[in-house]
Image: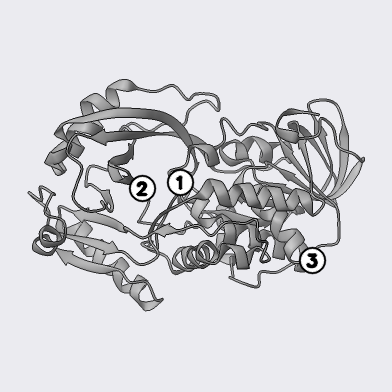
Amino acid sequence: MAKAGFADAPSRASFDVVIVGGAIMGSSTAWWLTELGFDGSVLVVERDPNYEFCSTAHTNSCIRQQFSTELNIRISQFTADFILNLRDRMGGDDRIPEIPLHSYGYLYLADNEGFAETLRRNAKLQNSVGAATRIVSAAQIAEAYPFYDLDGILCGSINTVNEGYWDGATVFDWFRRLARERGVEYVAGEVVEMERSARGIESVTLASGEVIRCGSVVNASGPRAARTAKMAGLDLPVEPRKRYSYIFKAEHPLDRPLPLTIDPSGVHVRDNGGGTYLAGGHPEHDPAVPFDDFTMDHSFWQDHAWPLIATRIPAFESVKLLSEWAGHYAYNTLDQNAILGSHPDVPNFLFLNGFSGHGLQQSPAMGRATAEWLIHGEYRALDMTPFSYERVMSNAPILETAVI
């Protein structure tokens, strides 16, 4: 057997569905196929069976409804319900834990009237579909959270209902575990080639040489999505962008939970429990990086992120850095939104790509939508049609103004 209980090779030469990538998007899709009654065979091919380098392993595991498009808001609401009712949503299995959603909220801070107006416009949309977002003045922020230095801040936007952070690793584990228990086959390997005909994708070839015939292929390969699409002769505007994360302990912890605070500089920081805090950000120069580049730029914390955080929250002038890591966004250069569903010219090739940093919080809804498409040829729980590949072909972006 291969690492992590994966098979070294597929047990058969053909599958109804081959999912390229077994992290949270691929595993959500696999589980939803079993949950919605798909009666075909499913193979998940994962090149990194220990999940050491996948985006799922590097996530900050947050969820928010503060998006600027209605569909993204509704997707987060779907996930919040899924998290809060995890055991029931996953079949009532007593082994599945009940996990909390730590609703400390997101707090966007605006230091200019243009961004303040964007927050007001977004809040109006969010409220219209049931989100509890509030626009708060600097004085109101100071009253609720007196530890901030609010010099230059005009207002903020916050929602403390079903918005914060959660245990994404546990949900991922149960997606994968239950999918396997229900007959989905996971294999350690890498898809390196696809055979395409007039019908669509006929087969995939693994690095080990096995050729697997398939009914449909799902591209769930995260930052490597463009490489996977290229095997099918398709272009995809998705590339790896590096993001840095840090966990630190404060010598003087705050006297109340810290919302995920998005400073106008782009650096963000939130409560992590036990007097520790999680921060993240990226340099202003933000190019695509090689798939295997997880090198830390240690100067970014010392010279940029920490000084900005300590300026905004003076209590953090004395901290101890506990851990740090670099992860990759699967960054959609067109509009930082998901690309979902089949390709019009290759109908059995499905995209599940380009989440640009909000993939973990969208994984329950996106996995369900992909499973619905495979089973029914249409979306049922949420209409994901706006995320179709056709907008890439016509260069018609759906601009999301609330990207962190």
Using the image, determine if residue 286 lies above or below residue 379: above
Query: Which element carries disc 3, helix, strand or loop?
Result: loop
In the displayed structure image, the side of residue 27 where residue 193 appears, left or right: right
Q: Are marks 3 and 2 in contact (CB under 8 Å)?
A: no
Choose mark 3 or mark 2, whichever is in front.
3
Give the image location of residue 8, x and y in percent: 81, 30
Counting residues from the N terminus, which is met first, the one under dot 1 or under dot 2?
Answer: 1
Query: Which residue is found at the position 15% from the left and 43% from the top?
Result: 312
Residue at the location (92% across, 40% down)? 13
Residue tagged 3: 37
Look at label 1 and name its amino acid.
Gly
Badge number at residue 357: 1
Q: Is residue 1 above or below residue 261?
A: above
Judging depth in this view, the residue of 197 and 364 nearest the camera is: 364
The x and y percentages for residue 67 are: 38, 61
Distance from disc 3 to disc 2, alpha carbons, whole Å, reads: 36 Å
Q: Which colour scheme is used?
A: one colour
Do callouts 1 and 2 mark residues in contact (Cβ within 8 Å)? yes
